[in-house]
Image: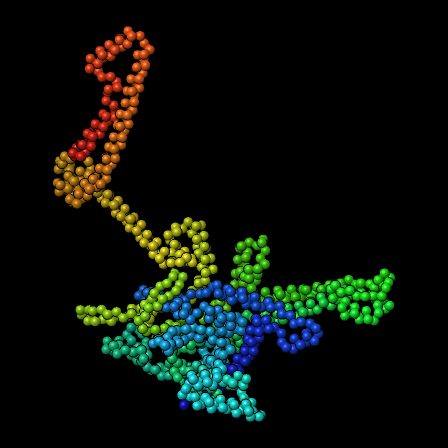
Amino acid sequence: MADIGKYRRWFREAADFASDWREAARTDYEFVAGKQWDEADKRAFAQSGRPAITINRIKPLINVLSGYQRLNRYDIEFLPRTSDDMELCRVRQGMTKYILDRCNYDREESQVFLDAVIGGLGWFDVGYRFNDLATDGEAYVRREDPFGMYLDPETHALDFSDAKYICRAKWVTKDALSLAYPEHAEDIRAQYAVYDKAEHTSGKDIDPLWYKRDTDKARLVECWYKVKVPQTLYYLTDGRVLPRESMDISYFLEGLVAGQRMAHMTQVRVASFLEDVLLDDIVSPYAHGDFPFVPLTCYHFGAEDLPAGFVRDLIDPQREINKRRIQELHILNTTGNGGGWIEEDAMTDRQKADFKKHGNIPGHYSEVLPGAISQGKILERATGQMPQGVIQAEAQAGQDLVEISGINEALMGVDIPNSASGRAIELKQKQAITHIAPMFDNLRAAKKKIAVLLWGEENRPGVVPQFYTEDKVYRVEGTNGQQFIRVNQDVVQEDPLLGTIHQTLNDLSVGAFDIVVSDVEASTTQRQAQMWGLVDAVSKLGVPGDMVFDLIIDLSDIPNKEEIKQRYAERLTAQQQLTQQQNALQTQQLEASMELARIQATRQSQSISFKDAPLPLQFAMAAKQGLIDPQVGQYAVDLMVEQLFPQLAEKMAAERQQQAAQEEQAAKLQQLQAMLQEKMQQNIPASAQNGAQGASVGAGSQGQAPPAERPPAAAQGSTMTKAALQSLLSGAAPAM
């Protein structure tokens, strides 16, 4: 039987060890919430007629840190160790995205970060939740209440990895506990009966560590602890070391086992108990062999130092600001009326009492005896001023908050002078970021530990490989839109020699990889800054946009990123193919020219008489003579038909248009000449006209046509063009 006394002693030691931290952490949370006065101070101020004013300067600083964390989230990436694991790493990254989205991890992370920033310590719980209404469940990562976690006081590692045990405690009712452990319902009722009896027995106190009298709740403790157990390890010929539970009979049959030895391995167990009732003591349901809890600390420097948050060092300056503000208001209230000097006979006793009570109220009028003012029996003193020492002390306290926290106005985005350059503002922001960098480095380490618990390490499968074993399709929502991932797909292949072969695609339990938390933030703001920085660098350096197009798309927030990149890749591939075709054509032309030179040299030796033929026909005739490949000759003829004939047709059409234009111009000229001749005949004597007609007839009788009847030059040119075309088509040299 398990020793419940040991578990009870462990829990008490952890509770005593953490008592100082819990008290300080609760104060930290109260200061952030604005509860910055204890009851004794409130009563003292109330008795003196002064209000307990709170000027909460801490909460805005915490909001800045929380906002910066929410805008700068880190991605979990998987790096393959071999080229065969690249696709599996992509699947793991998608599955991790799916799991974290399902459990609202971003919200849980932000709350754990606040726990660490405020109180110094936050906790993640990484596990698997079964669904009673389905055949499976789902992995989760959630926040755990830091005040419900109790740590081994002997731990020395900064990440508590050397702790022997970690306890998680919570207050539960009798009915809820009996429903969760029905097999121990009788023992649970007996334990509560002990508390009820002790409550009504005079002189006996109930230990507050185990029972709350006001809520009638007992403390349920889960103690996760490590033990050493003997285990047989097998050494395989490929270098692997496997425990007995991971061995398969095929390893022995195939001769892969090189040896074995006994070793003491770490095993995690969990014991659940009340003060005197042991409910469970079982092996951890998780095969990764580690605690399912991941701590996140803000400031923690060693075993002797308790975790501290961002608020711890800001409490004293905040108290000073509050007290000095109260002092300032008191000075203003008491010196609002500067007072003065009054002679005894200037007021009655009733008037003096009224003046003392209401003299400092703005707008109040006091009665005096007749003639007291005109006779100068009342002299007013100047209004009191706030002492400069008080003002300077409050300003110094506010400056202390900035210097201690490291969060300046540049990071907060306020009170930036217009004269400040962008470079100066950037340097101030980097200064503040450097101050708070350790807590974000701790967050990155915690997130890596979460990924390790989800996926495991060598020979220690994590939550996902252990429980996600079914063939299933998961939808992943991301910046690139929706994508579907199918895992553990059983594929059957028939091999003529080996027979039926079963293969699992996207097997989540295989593959070698390394887990890293990227330094490139996943937030929208940071991605956009990086995108525009890349665009600016490309434009300044003159780098072709094609080289970084995919990077710019990934950093942008436009939808359907993958579709855009796919379309761009297809267009780029088409351009590359076109370029390759053009290069191939140029190569063919060059080879054809070289082949032509060879043919000409051969033709001279064989006295082939076709040197005056057009070049394509020379190829055709060479192919006919058997000098070159017939395909080359046919290609040349096709090329001539495809390229040369259209050019000739265009040339002929142009010449016909030119001929028509010339004919039209000649007709107009002939008409003009006729009009001029008619006009001249009207203006000369008849005898002269007869002479001119005779001359014209005589010229015609000699066989000379009038100038208007001569064929135009275009007609002659058309005849030469047709002849040249006919010569080309017949294979002879074109006539010029």
Q: Residue at x 51, y 65 (%)?
A: 67
Q: Tell me where residue 625 appears, x and y as whole percent.
A: 12, 40
Q: Residue at x 15, y 42 (%)?
A: 623
Q: Tell me where residue 656 appears, x and y as whole percent.
A: 25, 30
Decide if residue 632 is on the left or right side of residue 672.
Answer: left
* Location of residue 386 (image quadrant): bottom right
Q: Residue at x 51, y 78 (%)?
A: 147
Q: Is residue 542 above or below residue 650?
A: below
- Farthest residue to the top: give it: 687
Q: Is residue 588 above or below residue 456?
A: above
Q: Is residue 687 above or below residue 547?
A: above
Q: Tell me where residue 440 appears, x and y as whole percent.
A: 49, 67
Q: Tell me where residue 131 appears, x and y as whole percent.
A: 38, 76
Quarter of the image containing the C terminus? top left
Viewer-nearest residue: 255 or 409: 409
Decide if residue 388 is on the left or right side of residue 424.
Answer: right
Viewer-nearest residue: 466 or 709: 709
* Location of residue 260 (image quadrant): bottom left
Q: Residue at x 55, y 60 (%)?
A: 413
